Amino acid sequence: MEFKVVQKELELQSRGWIPTFHDVSKEIIEIVEASGVKNGTVAIVSHHTTCSVMVQESSHDIDSFDLEYLQHDLLDIMRELIPDFAEEGQYRHPGPIHSQFGRYVGEPGDYTSKNTDGHLRSVFFGRSETMTIKDGKLDGGEFAHIYFIDWDHVRARRRQVNVTVMGTTEDVGDRKFNNGEVIDTLRKFTDDEKAYMEEFDLQLKR
């Protein structure tokens, strides 16, 4: 059985001033289909520490901020948990040493390090997603889209998504576990747990 690995990099342009949600579903599907991998996985990973990858439904409607409604709902929740960096001293980060490091590596100004909200949201939300490939197709269910989220909104900038496809170029046979029988994970009560108790009398004897 042949095992194959394919890696691609997607280049994106974020707009700044508000977090950017990039729908990269079409590109990921094209990479998977061109890879020759029939059965395996694809990892979609942010190259950056202030960005995340999300698999979620497209909510179609777009508001005046160019965000889908579900995306803006998510942003509202993240702003409640981790407020936008809006004023000096709001967060401990960045300290003076980190700010000097930014100047050393050529950052255009100290303001570009005022992206603590983006770092915290990325840590909270995660930087990658892994999806299954079945019979040469990305298995996203009926409604899944793949979004790259740039939480860092202090400036417009180029971003990169790393995509790694891994798997076999051959069929894997029957995937059904236990012949596809539905697994019952609901709690089962023992006879002792269901036994009559005197405390039930008032309800049972009415």
Image (cartoon, grey):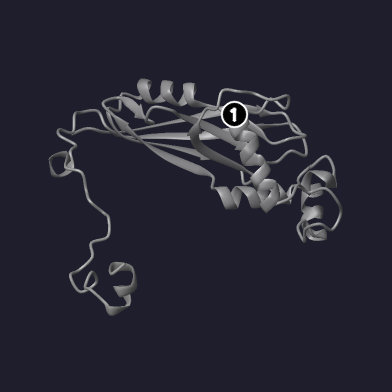
Question: Disc 1 residue type?
Answer: His
Residue placed at 74% from the left, 31% from the top? Answer: 156
**Residue 106: percent from left, percent from top:** 79, 42
Q: Is residue 52 left or right of residue 132?
A: right
Q: Nearer the viewer, residue 134 or 61?
A: 61
Q: Quadrant of the N terminus?
A: top left
Judging by the rendered image, the residue that carries numbered circle 1 is 22
Residue placed at 56% from the left, 23% from the top? Answer: 60
Q: Nearer the viewer, residue 198 or 68?
A: 198
182 w.r.t. 140: above or below: below
Badge count: 1
Q: Is residue 140 left or right of residue 104?
A: left
Q: Quadrant of residue 39?
A: top left
**Residue 125: percent from left, percent from top:** 56, 48
Q: Quadrant of residue 171?
A: top left
Q: Nearer the viewer, residue 189 or 110?
A: 189
Q: Quadrant of residue 203?
A: bottom left
Q: Is residue 190 left or right of residue 165?
A: left
143 w.r.t. 73: above or below: above
Residue placed at 72% from the left, 27% from the top? Answer: 65
Q: Is residue 93 left or right of residue 130?
A: right
For the question of whether residue 50 can be seen, the reply is: yes
